[in-house]
Image (cartoon, rainbow, N blue to C red):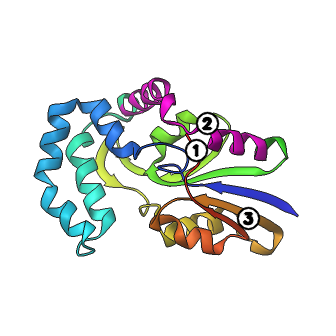
Amino acid sequence: MKKIYAFDFDGTLTTKDTLLVFIRYACGFWLFALGFLRYSPLLVLMKLGLYPNWKVKQKVFSFFFKGMTIEAFDDLCQRFAQDNLHLLRSQGIKTLMQAQDDGAEVVIVSASIDNWVKPFFADVTVLGTQIEVNNGVLTGRFLTKNCYGQEKVNRILARYPHREDYHLTAYGDSRGDKELLAFADESHYKPFSA
């Protein structure tokens, strides 16, 4: 039977939420602070469960990146990965590489924008939140649903529709991973050691 290993990214394979680190890396401290100050009321409502996670995330993303060319954004994502390899948890990377060595197919299923997750992993499939691009420019909107909660399961099933044909092992560390972990044959609910 085919073996598939699905890893969450933020918090599971990394020591920090990369959305925040990426924005600060891309925009600098003062613009980062201004953006989050502007959206702090929505962030509070989101934490209280009164405003959808994906809407806040899209608004924040749009504030910082709407109007940027996809070439400039992808270049920024490449540099971000190169300069931030220290964010990766060594035990998680060892587990991921061991799964590959054992012949399993490895996939990262993340709510992060896949453009900055992919450069961390040259030979791993990334199912992340995708951004909308129009005429080579970021619109500030998401092309797909935020890859969080049930959407992680949906993405796995879209890529691997014949559930009876594979054994799924999943790794996650937050409430956004619970549906994927419940869906898996084997699940691990904790971050790896650094």
Is 90 magenta? The answer is yes
Cα distance between the residues tagged 3 and 2: 22 Å
Q: Position of residue 82 (x, y in %)?
A: 49, 24
Residue found at x 27% / y 40%: 65
Main secondary structure found in the magenta portion:
helix
Residue found at x 52% / y 65%: 177
The residue beneath circle 1 is 193
Q: Earlier in the sequence, mark 3 or mark 2?
A: 2
How many other residues sit within 10 Å of disc 1, few (<14), some (14-19) or many (≥20)? few
Q: Which mark is residue 97?
A: none
Q: Earlier in the sequence, mark 3 or mark 1?
A: 3
The residue beneath circle 3 is 168
Left or right, residue 186 beside residue 129: right
Q: Earlier in the sequence, mark 1 or mark 2?
A: 2
The label nearer to you, 3 versus 2, is 2
Q: What residue type is disc 1 on?
A: Ser
Cα distance between the residues tagged 1 and 2: 7 Å
The label nearer to you, 1 versus 2, is 1
Q: What segment is highlighted magenta in the picture?
A: 73-99
| Cβ–Cβ under 8 Å for marks 1 and 2 | yes
Residue found at x 58% / y 44%: 193
Circle 1 SS class: loop
Q: Position of residue 166 (x, y in %)?
A: 80, 66
Label total for image: 3
